[in-house]
Structure formats: structure tokens, C-alpha cells
Amino acid sequence: MRQQRPLIDWFGLLALAVLWGTSFLFVKIAVREVPPLTLVAARFVIAASVLGVAVRARGLRLPTSRRVWGHYLLMSLIGNSIPFTLIAWGQIEVDVGLAGILMGVTPLMTLLLAHFFVLGERMTPRMVGGFVVGFIGLVALFGPEALLEFGGESSDLLSQLAIGLAAICYATNTVITRRLGTLDPLVSATTVMWITTAIMVPAALWLDRPWNLAWSATSIASVVWLGLFATALATIVFFSIVQRAGPTFLSLISYMIPVVALAAGAIVLDEKLVGTVLIGMALILTGLAISQLGSRTG
């Protein structure tokens, strides 16, 4: 018997979309003074520190199994280090609109991977149809002209492929997370943050030499917000959603984040929302509704 998905799943997804979607504002502020690698490393240092304190306060223990740590290492690479680097490098050549559309393949790729590798996650015509409507909405959101940029010179194509590969990384990571089992979300988030920090900090120290940077109060505040909320809290919510609702449901966030980001830009930065943006938002919300209509709760 099919039941409507519980509200807590939708609340978690919306919370995560807000945390990740609004982070674009703070990244835009911080990156004016802080190089990308240092920004990413600082986020993870803050997140790893806060989560480590939280684990200790709750009396929890990090996993001791080498197999589990290997699993988390894979997630740290595929879910954080590699896609963060690919997107940062790719966006040197690729505009925001096309990058957003390329990242929009994440839900469809997650649906395909989950169908084969996650028990109980099966593709249905309704789900595929809903995701396709959502993708069309994503194209409308950024403007169909963004698709005209696809291909181009070889350097542009490589940059586009890098962002597309990052989207595949994110899809793969959500499936790996579900297959990990039912470990405490706080423990999972902390372990991943610590491993990613160990990877990103040496890279930032070597390439950016952050001790030579001039940090303003605004950039520091932005980095702290990104570390505490968009990274630490968001990672806990991420693991909770995947364990409760599955990777296919979580992948819907790839359509929600651009909506939140554009809305935040309109509210905070007074950016104008044109008609195609509103149409795109409507199509995305319609696609979400279609894909989840009558979905299983377990």
C-alpha cells in the first residue's frame, strides 16, 4: 500500500535546500578576498571542529572498522574533494547558467544508479516524468540560451565535462551513503568532515598560502556561517535524509537549490526575477510533485 511521504522528509529536504542554496550568497561575498581552495578548507576545518565537539558531548564514538573508514574515505573524495575541485575549475570557463543545467543531471543519474544498486529504489514512469519536468524547469530557470554554450572550443568542453562529472560524483555519493547502513548521522558527518579536512587543508596551504591573505570581518563572518550551517549542519541533515527517505528523494534537492539561490539573490541582493525564472520555478515545483506523488515512505 502506498502512503504519502511524511512531512519530516519534506521539511528536512527544504532545510537542506535553504542551507545549501543560500550558501551561494556567502560564497560570493567571501571569495572576493579568499581563494577558493582556502575557502573550502576553512569551511571543513570549522565543520570538523564543531562536529567533533558534538560527538564528544553526546558520548558517541567514531567507527573503528577499517572497512567503514575506507567507505568514508570514498565518500569524502567522491562527495566533497573531487566535485568541489571539478566545479571550481570548470566554472573558470563555464557560466553559471550552463553550470546549473549541467548539475541538473544529478537527480536523473541518482535515479538510474539507485535503481540498480539500492534495494527498494526502482525507476517508475512517474518518477522519470517528474524529473524530466524538473530538468525542463531548470533550463527555463537559467534561460534556454544557456544551452547554446554547450560544446564550443575544446577548453570549454573539458570544463563542461568537469562539471558534468561532478554531478555524477554527487549522484554516486548519495547511493554510497544509503548503502553504508544506519550509523548515527552525526558520526557519519563528523568522520567525512575530518577526512575531507585532512585532504583539503594541505592543498590550500600549499597552493594559496592563506597566512598572506587579508581577511576582513565580512569574509570571516561568511566563512564561519558556511562552516557552521552550510557544511556542518547541512551534512548531518544530508545523512539523515538519505537514511530515512533514500537517495532518489534526496536527489530532488538539485532542482530546489537553484530556486532558493535565485530567491535569496532577489531578496538580499535585489536581483530581478524575470518571467522565465518564475516559469522555471513553477515547472520545478510541478516536477517535484509529480515525482513524489504517492511515493513510498520507507
Image (tube, rainbow, N blue to C red):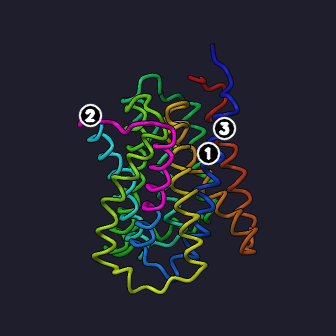
Magenta stretch prevailing secondary structure = helix
Decide: marks 2, 3 in contact (CB < 8 A)?
no
* Segment tinted magenta in the rendering: 44-67
Q: Judge whether 64 appears above or below 191 on screen.
A: above
Numbered tag placed on residue 10 in the rendering: 3
Which of discs 2 and 3 lies nearer the camera? The answer is: 2
Q: Residues within 10 Å of mark 3 (few under 14, many from 20)?
A: some
Q: Specify the farthest residue to the left.
A: 66
Q: Specify the farthest residue to the top.
A: 1
Query: In the visual, does 161 lie left or right of 13?
Result: left
Amino acid type of disc 3? Trp
Q: Judge whether 244 appears above or below 56 on screen.
A: above
Amino acid type of disc 1? Val
N-term mark: 1 or 2 = 2
Q: CA distance from mark 3 to mark 1?
A: 19 Å
Q: Quadrant of residue 198?
A: bottom left
